Image (cartoon, helix red, strand yellow):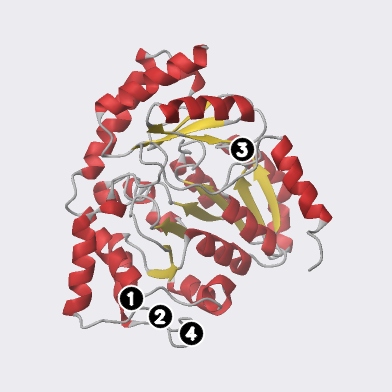
Amino acid sequence: MNGFPKKLEQKLKNRQENKALRSLSEPAAIIDFASNDYIGFSSSRLIFDNTHKSLIEKGIYQNGATGSRLLSGNHPLYLETETMLTTFHNAEAALIFNSGYDANVGFFSSVLQRGDIIFYDELIHASIRDGITMSNAKSYKFKHNDIEDLREKLQRAVPDNKRHTELVEVYIVTESVFSMDGDVPDLKAFARLCKEKNCHFIVDEAHATGVFGYNGVGLIQKLKLEDQIFARIHTFGKAMGCHGAVILGSSKLKSCLVNFARSFIYTTGLSPHSLMTIQSAYNELKFTPEIEKLQRNIQFFNEQLEVNKLKDVFIESNSAIHCCIISGNEKIKKIASQIQERGFDVKPILSPTVPEGKERLRFCLHSYNTKEELAEVLALLATFTKN
């Protein structure tokens, strides 16, 4: 066998020298401040048992989908689950994808056409960036959550006279809760701008699903903006505790995705068990007290930031994600290791995942974290950041 490619060898070496080389490790048996399992659904025995019971009651003993949905994999549970999602999320149509990454790559690479223009927040998720890159559209980033910067760039890139002379479709995409900052844009203001400028508004609700709104419907429904959104992406691998994602929009949008989204067309469908787990998790949202527990923990965590005089080093957040900015990969890894040694699983987020100088500790809060745990982990952080 030939030797390992020299260019790849150099890339790994550069990562190692920058203290940013990633590796896989087994989950630590310590207090969870790292996972996206915000309301504990991934380990819910009730959801597990209800999934199994429902499959048995329906006489479904099939382990796999057997093929893509356009061939043999369009199991009847797909229609059931998508119908349930349209009702729950007040949408016209729903299309399930195998993951949030598949949904975003498939959507942006197929919907955006040559000559189209898309504006995206500079901190948008990598899956959205990848989908945009795979498209033929022109793309422009705007400053994080800065609607005035967006307005200015929109006017420069798409002056009003251009709309009258060319067929220009303009899209704007943001997240309702940002995964690496935990903050929330002014979604109402973005929706108003999109309406004013005749732009198609797209919102990724990955970290709002199961966290915000009545029964965890997300921020768009909480703000009653459903009718102003061209497409919503909800993922099931965070608060819902399972796997997959859904794109919500019009029936015409669904038809376009079925016909042109390659990450949908050329992949094996989800198993019946995965689909029933999605149904069971959504059914549990209607009754669970965990969302209220999570909201109380978020409030307590913010209070403890004041107590420990840490508010200035944290990004302001009322979501389940809270980030402490500590510059430097080596320094942030050291502090994370010290906290982990005390029994708290807090992960460092290194550059290049975040910009250099914006390295951080990322605290993911959960309904099952106790107030004692929340207070202690911040007290430890206060101690280690002073050393």
Q: Which mark is residue 272?
A: 1
Q: Which mark is residue 70?
A: 4
Q: Nearer the viewer, mark 4 or mark 3?
A: 3
Alpha carbon of mark 2 to alpha carbon of mark 4: how far? 11 Å
**Element assignment for label 2:** loop
Please report whichever mark, 3 or 2, sits nearer to the chain's N-terminal start: 2
Alpha carbon of mark 3 to alpha carbon of mark 1: how far? 37 Å
Answer with the quarter of the image where residue 283 lies: bottom left
Please report whichever mark, 3 or 1, sits nearer to the chain's N-terminal start: 1
Disc 3 residue crowd, few under 14, some 14–19, many 20+, Cα 10 Å: some
Please report whichever mark, 2 or 4, sits nearer to the chain's N-terminal start: 2
**Element assignment for label 1:** helix
> Are circles 3 and 1 on residues that touch, CB within 8 Å?
no
> Are circles 1 and 2 on residues that touch, CB within 8 Å?
yes
Residue in the image at 35% along x and 45% along y: 223
**Element assignment for label 3:** loop
